[in-house]
Amino acid sequence: MIPEVGVFALVLALLVAAVQAVLPLAGAHWGVAGWMRVARPAAALQCLFAWLAFACLVQAFLTGDFSVRYVAANSHSELPAVYRFAAVWGSHEGSMLLWQCLLSGWTLAVALCSRQLPPAYVARVLAVMGMISVGLLAFLLFLSNPFERLLPAAAEGRDLNPLLQDPGMVLHPPLLYMGYVGFSVAFAFGIAALLSGELNAAWARWSRPWTLAAWSFLTLGILLGSAWAYYVLGWGGWWFWDPVENASFMPWLVGTALVHSLIVTDQRGAFRGWTVLLAITAFSLSLLGTFLVRSGVLTSVHAFAVDPGRGLYILCFMVAVVGGSLLLFGLRAPTVRGGGWFAALSRESLLLANNVLFSAAALAVLIGTLYPLLLDVLGGDKISVGPPYFQAVFVPLVVPALMLMGVGTMARFKRSTLPELGRRLRWALAASGVSALLLAALLPRGGSTAWTPLSAFGLLLAAWCVCSTLAHAWQRLAGADDGGTGWRQHMARQPRGWWGMLLAHLGIGVFVFGVTLANGFESRRELSLALNQAVSVGGFTFELQRLDRSAGPNYDAQRGHVAISQEGRPLTVLRPEKRQYRAQGMPLSQAAIDTGLTRDLFIALGEPVDARTWTVRIQVKPFMAWIWIGCALMAAGGLLALTDRRYRATARRRQPAERGAAVLGHPQEVA
Amino acid sequence: MRFLLPLLAFLALAVVLGLGMGRDPRALPSALVNQPAPAIGLPLLHAPQQRLDTAQLRGQVWLLNVWASWCEPCRAELPALKVLATRDAVPLYGLNYKDRDAAARKLLAQVGNPYVASAVDTDGRVGMDFGVHGVPETFVIDAAGHVRLRHTGPVTAEVWRDKLMPAIRNVR
């Protein structure tokens, strides 16, 4: 009964979404206020129905209703409750439902937080989001119905894919989708501005908090996905340039460009056409990511079940959404004129450089991801583009962007001069050189890995990211201290947006530091390890002390007890497992990792050689945790900037124009 | 006009995606199934003056494993390959795909070399003849020099037991 309620809720959501897509748009076009007012209640109702459907599916999973095909395929009576909940989005139908629920959640958030915006504009934004909802809800109902019955009911479920039975998987898809779908808000704001023909700075200001929120969620989603690959795939790497990873990384790169481009459009009115194109691109790449994962055109470590009919639908949907919006862009963008003037050396030009580099990086990843497909289609051969391509193309594009990051925050809007920039940056430059040398001298060097020019450069780059950011903070806090106020008060007066920027830029430095050391100085061995045999890797001694069996709720495992010591001092005992999941009989190697601030110790069981010997993979990765910390700092920076006062001040600014200008005067300094 | 360029680029992309959908990226190009394996004739990793001559391997069933040191799953499967190929006495040859010789030799020295010999395919041309899509891949080649099976992805004990060995026993 309850699954039927779910289907019914989806049908109602589709009907409401159709009204939301059409009526407010027509109202905005012909100036009918009553039609425009439909948008908000429609958004709320659509959200209610979508989440009702979601609740029905959750109920089916928690009670183990195996008469629902999707539940029978992805759950099991022995599956722990938390994974039964996560199994809701463990496969295609449920994750599409989650997509839709998050989309209607974002729509409702826009409806609630847009009281101060012009009604016609809000009506258009909500209508555009309603159109996307119509497309997705129709997809859910006609091609991916999660509530489809299985009659007679299965006696037992087929269990959730063991690879997904991991704490990271509980949170990774919702966060990633929050990011993907969040870009639909920036997209809808851009389309609404194009539709109304008023592509002005106000549109950019309204988009900024939404874009920041989506970007932060996407950052967290990618972080968790990458950590999952590190813990669960058991290869010891954390980024494989896999098509599915690239699919989430491309919107992130374009989103990063968008976050920065919006600053210029908001504060200087420049780059308007370019910024709206980025907003369209970021969401288009989110759709493309969904298509790549769901249609099976590319092979990947993420082997999802695929269905060509669904792929075709998503492709048609994408052509309608992206093609339509790019057509609108092509027709309306030529009428956009003007924008603030700026010199060749200015914060605008540096932010433009950031934009170009990040977009080029996204394009390089796109080409690398789709090249095998293109060759195949052209009748050529089936090939793969490996990590060597991505490293060769991606790194040279991103490194200059990171080098310019420190310069950009120091530069002034409109015009900067070289001597002034040099004066502001020389301390940062000196400090980063000194700290890179100090770090190089002080770092504990386990293993025999020698310094390479690349790792030395990576360390210098990390130091530069951190030092230039700190120098900027110091100059702003100490340099402007002229009114006799204490630095404490001065600090308290700085807007949250600025603190968020500092945090995110510091996160980049921490991330580069982690990547340089973890990739450049790791020690790894793949070998056969017999009982009571010890092996030394990267200055640590690993001894296989005991082999036994253990049983989890839905799997049996062979387990090794590996004692780790350093210079005779016992550190810890790691217990890597080779699990056999009972329902699917699928083996899975569960690596054991000891995470520390300065190193990760990683051990995974491979295959048994005989009763006393296993092949094992041992890795010592220095400063691995800093990669995660860096990403978390970036996301935290984005979320902190979101709480900036000025995003809440939009309402008051509209009434007295004079006061509004005064309020604007202050945040001009903020980037 | 230049404002319409993004639209044109996107439409071209959509056409490629549409055409690509009808294809199974995991499928071996049908031309190769039960067809003679492409010739290799490339220098050996550990003896560059010698070449891997597939004609001399006629008369026995052998495995060709495509690998690279930059490929994480390849590193992961090496120990298993060594154990399994030795246990079941299957001659295992390697094709070192788009790799640097020094890095490849270093990896084998560290992990142990499961191969009778490994040919060096620096520019990936032979890999292309075999239709290599993503490393690692493993091919079963019979006594007449015909490709019998292609496995994409790392070889584990289960893959060996359930997929490769049955195919090998079939043609032995």
Image (cartoon, rainbow, N blue to C red):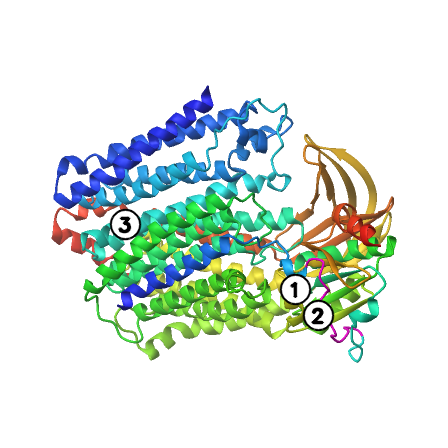
Main secondary structure type of the part rendered in magenta = loop
Q: Which residue is mark 2?
A: B103
Chain letter of the residue carrying label 1: B
Marks 3 and 1 share the same chain: no
Which residue sits at x=49%, y=24%?
A: A59
- Front residue of B72/B56: it is B56
Image spot of residue A440 (x, y percent): 61, 69
Q: Which residue is mark 1?
A: B70
Report the Cα–Cα distance between label 3 and label 1.
43 Å
- The mark found on residue A189 in the picture is 3
Report the Cα–Cα distance between label 1 and label 2.
9 Å
The earlier-in-sequence mark between 1 and 2 is 1
Binning the other alpha carbons within 10 Å of mark 3 as few (below 14), some (14 to 19) or many (20 upward) gives many
Circles 1 and 2 in contact, beta carbons < 8 Å: yes
Q: Mark 2: which amino acid?
A: Ala
Q: Is residue A232 visible?
A: yes
Chain letter of the residue carrying label 3: A
Image spot of residue B43 (x, y percent): 75, 76
- The mark found on residue A490 in the picture is none
Is residue B42 magenta-colored?
A: yes
